[in-house]
Amino acid sequence: MQFNRFPLRSVSAVASLLFAASTAWAVNPFTVRDIRIEGLQRVEPGTVFVSLPVRVGDIYNDEKGSSAIRTLFGLGLFKDVRIEVSGDVLVIVVEERPTVADVEFVGTKEFDKDVLKKALRDVGLADGRPFDKAQLDRAEQELKRQYINRSLYAADVVTTVTPIERNRVNLTFTVVEGDPAKISEIRIVGNKVFGESTLRGLFDLDTGGWLSWYTKSDRYSRAKLNADIETLRSYYLTRGYLEFKVDSTQVAILPNKTDIGITINITEGERFVVSGVKLEGNFLGKDDEFKSLVTIRPGQAYNADEVAKTTKAFTDYFSNFGFAFARVEARPEIDRANNRVALVLQADPSRRAYVRKINVAGNNRTRDVVVRREFRQFEASWYDGDKIKLSRDRVDRLGYFSQVGIETQEVPGSPDQVDLTVNVVEKPTGSLSLGAGFSSGDGLGLSFGLKQENAFGSGNSLGVQINTSKVNRAIVFSTTDPYFTEDGVSRSIDVYHRTTSPYQDQSYYQLVTSGGSLRFGVPFTETDTVYFGAGLEQTTIVPGTLLPTSYQAHIDEFGPTSLAVPLTIGWSRDRRDSALAPNSGRYQRANAEWSPAGDARYLRATYQYQEFIPINKQFTAAFNGELGWGAAVGDRSYPVFKNFYGGGLGSVRGFEQGSLGPRDVSGTSVGGTRKVNLNAELLTPFPGAGNDRTLRMYAFLDVGSVSGPDGGLAINENANSLRSSVGVGISWISPVGPLRLAFAKPIKKYDGDKIQTLQFQIGTTF
């Protein structure tokens, strides 16, 4: 049937909002016999029909027409919508928005294109989505925001829209990034007690130096500025300035959009001295015990850190008795006339709580038992803050998770019970490493490693390590079960093959060592572990050029191949804040090795002690001491290949690697049975690197010697004497590992010593 269309009864999208106000567009209500849709290309008709507020058989009127247009526009799929009426047939005429076919970026160097595409996807612009000019404007603003976060305020974005077939468009964002905005000035206004340069030295942000290309410390970041302001506030609050405040912070971008000026206005206030500390509230009748936790001292300047430390110690101590909800408030009573402050520590232990159950969340791969066996807080026991903290630290030390947190939830209807939820975020624990390195001592070295720290989520580790250089080559297979027994006794198995040569030329003699060992670690306390082990080891001396007389004597006595059965016992304790770039803490380890059977029978012991002391934010003092001792067992000679060596990085810098101690008649160093090594360092961030501790320089003093029975082989009467050196160096946590570079000058040396002024190595940590 042919229907006549009446233009006056058609409703455009623009006029739809006037339906209710103007009778010129009025349509007499009628019963809809049919609904047709025109103009669809990619949108499914069902999408339109489902969205319409009117169906066949319904009464159509102006209100439903307005509602239909608003609903269809709300889908975001159409750029124009009209409703036409032909008799009792409703005709929906739509014009689809173009679809984004492709998004391309030109001139983007600062960002990976996938990062930018994700940012645009978050604002609704992506391949396959309808194109909207409003979304395009938001996309341009989002791109500029991304660049502003990188201090590229001059970045300019130009968008090109290219229509293509089938009502699609290609979008091209052309970016002129410009130069990054750099901090040209940092001013602190209002300071009277401390110099402006002293206060600016606390900041990680600065006006740049010759290393700013590496540290990017002159790149403005709101987050970094906030952190620096908190550092400034802490600096005053820990020195008695109780009423210190930051009045305002202005960040000004100059018209060239490449220079930034920062002005921080502060009010220092008066310096207050603590006049006394009082305890108020309920301290469970243990007032004396709580008083012993107070680190705030009357007569000293007010120190916010000590106040926070004391209140935390109080809440932690309350938690040891099951009071999980204890509140401790430090209330200052200020005497401004005399610049004194009395602190009142108000305590409310609230109620005691039991731990009903412990849940583990986030461990999609790691088994629950791997986490639970590290816990020292048990279910159905009193809430114990110390045990909970220890449990969290033990789970974190596993190394399987990037984040570990413990949440405490009250049990509804049971005010004396709580549930603990251990939230973990798993990280990849498998590693495949390929690398190359070069050191002045070992020459070129290649490395390959394949290790899985958390094999199959069981907590066991499996690995193979291969290292090769012209003087040191090794292949090691290892596996460790940290809970070989339920009590936490670990078991480690190692199989290894090592080849060592004192020279890079393969025509020189070599030591080839093959063996295996079985070791158990027994946790005697929460922080101390003692290791027991046994192994079987075979060492072969491969004759070659410059074979030392002592090695030849060993061959004459035992033959070129010696078998040893080493029994080991060791102990370690590591309390450093970082294994790679420590700033504080202590590290100790001791190990004894005894071979009572086989061709090589000996006793060998080592001890190492390290201490790191933070002097201030910039300087750290580091001390290292090592002792080594070896002796023969029974009537056998001490095996020469178990000798200690000294000199070079990790020992006395400035002397050639392994050159200290007794020498053969040929002048070859053969090591000794006793070793002492002492190192002192003063570390500071590299000039121009701000407070970045991954790149530091250091000054050092080294003292050490290698000595022992030489059987008349030593040709230098001063072989056993101490050597020492001083110098400076650079420590860098590089992408390929810790790198140490040292420039040393021997201050105590003897004729014949092999001096090496410049030394470097990748992989050393002290």
Image (spheres, rainbow, N blue to C red):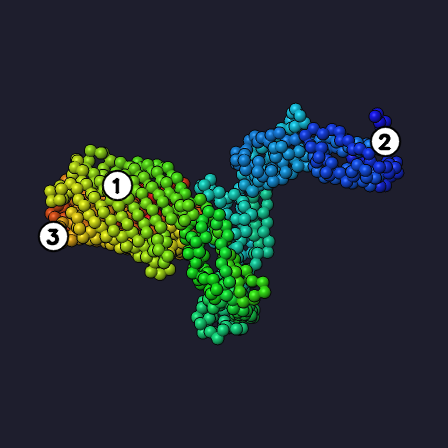
Q: Which of marks 3 and 1 is nearer the N terminus?
A: 1
Residue at the spot 51% in from the left edge and 66% down from the top edge: 353
Crowding at label 1, few (<14), some or many (≥20) Cα neighbours within 10 Å?
A: some
Q: Residue furthest bottom?
A: 285
Residue 635 shows which numbered tag? 3
**Is mark 3 in CB contact (under 8 Å) with mark 1?**
no
Quarter of the picture containing the N terminus is top right
Tell me the residue at 26%/36% (across/down): 470
Q: Amino acid under label 3? A: Asp
Distance between the Cα atoms at labels 2 and 3?
A: 120 Å
Give the Cα distance between marks 2 and 1: 95 Å
User: Is residue 183 found left or right of 672 in the rendered image?
Assistant: right
Tag of residue 498: 1
Task: Tell me, yes or no, whether the two marked residues, 2 and 1, touch with CB atoms within 8 Å.
Answer: no
Q: Which mark is residue 87?
A: 2
- The answer to whether residue 424 is above or below residue 58 is below
Q: Which mark is residue 381?
A: none
Front-lying residue, 376 or 165: 376
Could you tell me how far apart the alpha carbons at marks 3 and 1 are, in whole angstroms?
28 Å
Identify residue type, mark 2. Gly
Label 1 residue SS:
strand
